[in-house]
């Protein structure tokens, strides 16, 4: 079965300027499943407000990280049974790929997209991730 049949919404995000972001940080005191945090990797960090859904998909509001980009991230519903990276062999490329480690250097996830989602002038980023 194609990996496309296993991919579901992992999260989506928008990027806001500092003033708009600062205003929304108050949501955490109002909503139970809303967390304001700084995410750190071994080579990067970003600040976000994470609003969780019932299914653990989430909406992320980033503070001045992606130049106003809207992002849509997909991942396999059950990572133990499906590997998002197989989309690269199922669908013609080119593919842009990357890897993230957690702040302690442990593998966190691999990402793949048809576009360079790290390019600063992109407006929309659609990508898939495979957690480790």
Image (tube, grey):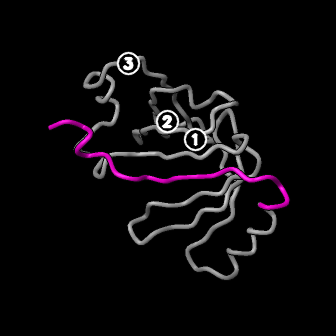
Alpha-carbon span between mark 1 and mark 2: 6 Å
Looking at the image, which residue is at 85% across and 60% down?
A: 19
Q: Give the residues drawn in magenta, as a range.
A: 1-20
Q: Which residue is mark 1?
A: 102
Which mark is first along the chain, 2 or 1? 1
Alpha-carbon span between mark 3 and mark 1: 28 Å
Percent of width and height locating residue 89: 28, 21
Which mark is first along the chain, 3 or 2? 3
Looking at the image, which residue is at 29% across and 24% down?
A: 91
Percent of width and height locating residue 97: 48, 25
Q: Which residue is mark 2?
A: 107
Looking at the image, which residue is at 57% across and 31% down?
A: 117
Q: Nearer the viewer, residue 92 or 109?
A: 92
The answer to whether the residue labelled 3 contacts the one labelled 1, judged by CB atoms less than 8 Å apart, is no
The quadrant in which the N terminus is found is top left
Q: Nearer the viewer, residue 18 or 121?
A: 121
Q: Which residue is mark 3?
A: 93
Q: Nearer the viewer, residue 121 or 8?
A: 121
The answer to whether the residue labelled 1 contacts the one labelled 2, judged by CB atoms less than 8 Å apart, is yes
Q: Secondary structure at mark 1?
A: loop
Residue 29 image-quadrant placement: bottom right
């Amino acid at each position: 079965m194609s990996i496309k049949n296993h991919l579901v919404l992992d999260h989506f995000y928008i990027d806001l300027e500092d003033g708009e972001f600062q205003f929304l940080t108050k949501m955490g005191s109002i909503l139970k499943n809303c967390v304001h945090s700084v995410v750190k990797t071994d080579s990067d960090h970003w600040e976000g407000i994470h609003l969780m859904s019932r299914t653990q998909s989430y909406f992320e509001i980033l503070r001045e990280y992606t130049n106003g980009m809207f992002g849509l991230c997909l991942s396999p519903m059950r990572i133990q049974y499906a590997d998002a990276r197989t989309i690269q062999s199922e669908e013609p490329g080119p593919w842009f790929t990357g890897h993230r480690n957690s702040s302690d250097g442990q593998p966190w996830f691999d990402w793949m997209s048809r576009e360079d989602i790290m390019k600063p002038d992109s407006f929309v980023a659609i990508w898939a991730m495979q957690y480790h």
